[in-house]
Amino acid sequence: MSGWIALSNITVRFGALTAVDAVSLDVDKGEIHAVVGENGAGKSTIMNVLFGLLVPDEGTIAIGGTPHAWKTPQDAIAHGIGMVHQHFMLQDSMTVLENVVLCAEPVNRLGIVDFATARAKLEDIIATYGIRSRLDARVADLSVSERQVVEILKVLYREAEVLILDEPTAVLTPQETRSLFEILANFKAAGKAIVIITHKLDEVMEVADTVSVMRGGRLVSSGPREATSKDEIARGIIGGDLPAPRARGPYAPGAPVLKVTDLVARGEGRPVGPVSLEVRKGEIVGVAAVAGNGQAELIETIVGLRRSAGGTVSLDGQDLAGKDVAARRALGLSYIPTDRQRVGLALEARVSENALIGREMESRFRRGLFQIGSQIDAFAREVIARYRIKVAGPRAKTSSMSGGNKQKLVVGRELSRETPLVIAENPTWGVDIGAIDFIHGELVRMRDAGHAILLVSTEIDEILALSDRIVVMFEGRITGSFAASDADRFEIGALMTSHGSGGIQTRDAS
Amino acid sequence: MMATDTGFAARLGPWVAVIAWLFAILLVLMIAVGASLDQAVSGFFNGAFGGRNSAYLMTTIGRSALIIGMALAVLISFRAGLYNIGGEGQLVVGGIVAALVGIYLPGPGPMVLAVGILAAMAAASLWAVLAGALQVYLGVPLLIGSLLLNYPARYISSYLVGHPFRDVAAGLPQTHMVPQGAWIPNFPGTRLDMGIILVLLAAVFTIVYAYRTVPGYRTRMNGLAPDFARASGLPVKRLVFQTLAMSGAIAGLVGAIAVFGVHYRFSDGMLVQPLYAWTGIIAVLMVGMVPWAVPLSGFFFAAVQTGAAGMERTAGIPKEIGLIMQAAIILFVASRLAVVNLAGSARGEGNDDRA
Amino acid sequence: MIALDVLLDPALLQSIPRFLTPILLAALGGALCERAGVFNIGLEGFILTGAFCAVLGAFFFGSPVMGAISAMAGGVLMALIFAEFHLRRPGDPIVVSIAINLLAAGLTLYLLSAIFGVTGAFRDPGIQGFAMIHIPVVRDIPVIGQLFSGQSPLYYIALVVAVAMHFFFRFHRLGLRMRAAGENPQGLVVGGVDPRIVRLYALVACGMLCGLAGAQLSIANVTLFVDNMSAGRGWIAVVAVLLTRGNPLAVLGIALVFGFVDSLSFRVQGYGAPQQFTDMMPYLATLAVLIGLSFWRKTRQTRA
């Protein structure tokens, strides 16, 4: 018995790598189908095949029993398939309306777009499904969840019968996730088929009718949710037993290392802040915020990459005013940036060159102005071994490594400096479970050894798993501050999207 | 993209196609002027490598010294991610300063030569740093600022040799000659000046700097990933000025060699018309900014130019065919290599939010 | 008010459009590329080719309209070469631009001697240039008359294109898609539109506009072709594009400033300043505008 949409024996190869290996998947109308798996398990790849972005090397797609071979997304769209990508594909400078019609414009003979017709159709859709959106707002001014709504509107505008959502909740707070699921339930009731790619098992258990698990490009299992359990799915994803919960030393914070007082950072448009916070020896302070709420500007200002517009930052009692990045690093600061591809690493350089950066003036690596290649390679080998980085050797090109290993190189380079303060910004963004586990372990080890760690993450789970204290930011301000033991996901989620109920929420035990 | 099981022939294929294209273009151009193929070919090789006592070969080598020099100036800045395309202005500034020092500084010849070269390097260096300052302090992208500075350099030098420092008796807009004692000597028995030795020294310096030194390493990291360099605490502003100063100094050296070794004076347009600076840029781009290959590609482009002049002499083909060949080569080769990504980094204007 | 006297000097006003038109046309072409995400700094080569082809057409067909049409064809040819090496093959746009500029310099001189047997310059009474258009009534209004009457037809075309392009980017399907190709091309890919095709359209239109810019130089301002006739105007157009981020009305404003400075320095030459200094003025003015704008942006940001 095959479903309304039947993917059979799909195989996709990228050069020597087989990203999807003979996977067959059925999706039915009026169901929410969750596809789960690790990064690199092939779930996005197979959905890109269904959407026509990739042409499979083998296998067929059939809808309602008719086989199809897409050449471009246009073909898939024409047959009622729509996709909301993990990274939104919107035009920031355009309005919601312009974004929605783009590539499906109603035009007259001269190619002039008929915005009135489009608006009427869109208002109809909005009314039908109970969606809220401001059609004339510029996308640049929208929050992340509002942008996601625009992506969904685009799909509905094209009269899609199948909605594919790639990691739709990764950027949402628990409240926003809940309202997304309400919209999806309306679609389901209207007889549409919905595919969600995700790695969040709680959500799967909450909304999915069918669950398919992928690992290493293969389909591990596929069946109704009632017939499986969260543990079984988790074991399927990892291909073995779950790692034991992490042991961490007792919480015994020492003297303050980083002190931020009324800091105002220059932003694009409006400034960020004022923000005050403190990180002490032996603690991890987690900053929870939806992307784009000023946490990046705050960190850049502390690191010295962005000018401050007021307030002070001190490190181990030293005022950092007027000091550049190099001086701040020398005083005892390490920085793991979000964007390892551009900020954390020079991808076209060798592994050893990336490992060396910041240390090139140390006397062991140079004789006068000349570098000592053997010493540099030896150091790179140490980092590779110590942080279990999988790479051909110190002279390999950095771009040849996987995402997880690239991130381990950044983490290794920064943590091995053993500075009093470590700033980690989304340190496990887009890496596999093994690397996440390793990096989390290293951060906790540093904390146990008495370092002060400022962790910024958009993932509430990561914040909850690592932090001793939690600070929540929204629109450039701190909206709440908790001891980790008192933290509640939903309360944090609420503070991530609003200024809270009058003033700053503080339930700091210490 | 995997080239694991493609054979040698398969990898050679595209290059054969490139060469076939180039020859087809040349053939069309030659037919257009009714030139005979074998005259053209022999004219080309004679013009590039032949002549009585290898005189043309010497011209080619002499010209390649100037092109390689300009290529080195480009190389140093491009590898640092600094798109200094104002080499022409820096070259002209170096040339005019060298000529004025050479003519008006009294003293023994060798000293005049040495001071002239150093003054030319310093002046051109300043001209390049000016473009850097426009970027760092005033937010004018280097790609544009350095280029726009070409024009004042060109017109100011043109004014200087056309009015205050003109050799009126000569009729043309040019300076007097520098005294013979300050000339760069020729290799014995040839008409090739020893300027190429200075250029080769500059090449060795550039290669060692790029691969072996700490500032070379920092420059390279800044060129490959500017955000990475900033976040890692490299002294980015200082690198900009240091690199541009070196780049300009080499361009100035080339200007001095042209004055003291080739023309013995500065005449209007003598450093602009032959497009030394632009040829230097394409010589670097053709080999994907690999330092050791730059001298080879510099020589290659010099040979294309002198060969084209030979084709004009023997086969009556306009010598601009050389320019067309250069452009076609760079189009086919550089678009195949695709190792350079200039545009991405050239667009980023200084974001003033950042410290 | 001596200053106002100089500014409203009829001869000065009359000459602004001749300096403004080539820069405006080229910069409008550049604006299309900029908005569509093609980093085209080869405008100089496009213009030069246009100037040569204009003379070619005006000479052999004896008509300035044919000159303009062949100028556009020449510009489009360069644009197609650009597209072949940058869009179809993965060539870096700066490298391709530099090659295009060299190619135009070489090709025009080569063909000049191949076709006309001359080097450096070609002038001939057989080249039919554009006649200036005198508009009745308008021509008698002070200031307006000088600015809007007695000008080359290409000037009026340029003004119309600038305004039309403003609406094109807002209301035309292709205009919207061009903006998307420049801002987030992946958004087009997932919509089933190949951004490279959109960019090809932008490049071709840019080739036409730059061709007309060249025609203004060689068959409207004068009727002859000389070596390196574009003389850096393509670079000034590039600056105008970068400064305005491809906004056509802002391009019009900037071109007006440049045109004014050009004609002013042309007038100053009449008072005996050395020619080199007046030649230098447009470039210094361009730098000054660049610097001024960056200051303006800085202060605006600080206040925010």
Image (cartoon, coloured by chain):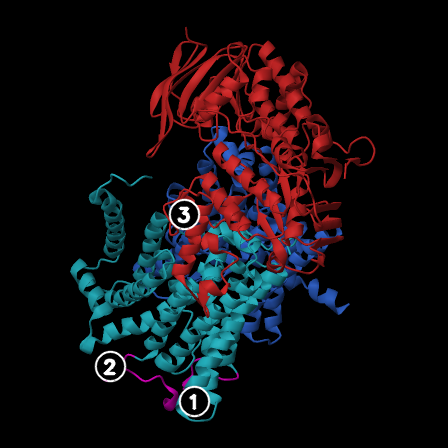
Chain colours: A red, B cyan, C blue
> Residue pushed farthest bottom?
B107
Q: Secondary structure at mark 3?
A: helix
Residue at 41% x, 46% y is C86
Circle 3 is placed at which residue position? C82
Q: Quadrant of the N terminus of chain A?
A: top left
x and y percentages locating residue A71 in the rendered image? 39, 25
C-alpha gap between disc 3 and disc 2: 44 Å
**Which of the chains bears the disc numbered 2?**
B
Does label 1 or label 2 sit earlier along the sequence?
Answer: 1
Q: Start and end of the magenta stretch? A: B164-192
Circle 1 is placed at which residue position? B111
Circle 2 is placed at which residue position? B190
x and y percentages locating residue A213 in the rendered image? 46, 20
Whether A71 is drawn above or below C84: the answer is: above
x and y percentages locating residue A162 in the rendered image? 51, 17
Of marks 3 and 2, the one in the foreground:
2
Of marks 1 and 2, the one in the foreground:
1
Give C102 or C145, whichever is nearer the viewer. Answer: C102
Give A485 or C233, whichever is nearer the viewer. Answer: A485
Q: Amino acid at mark 1?
A: Met
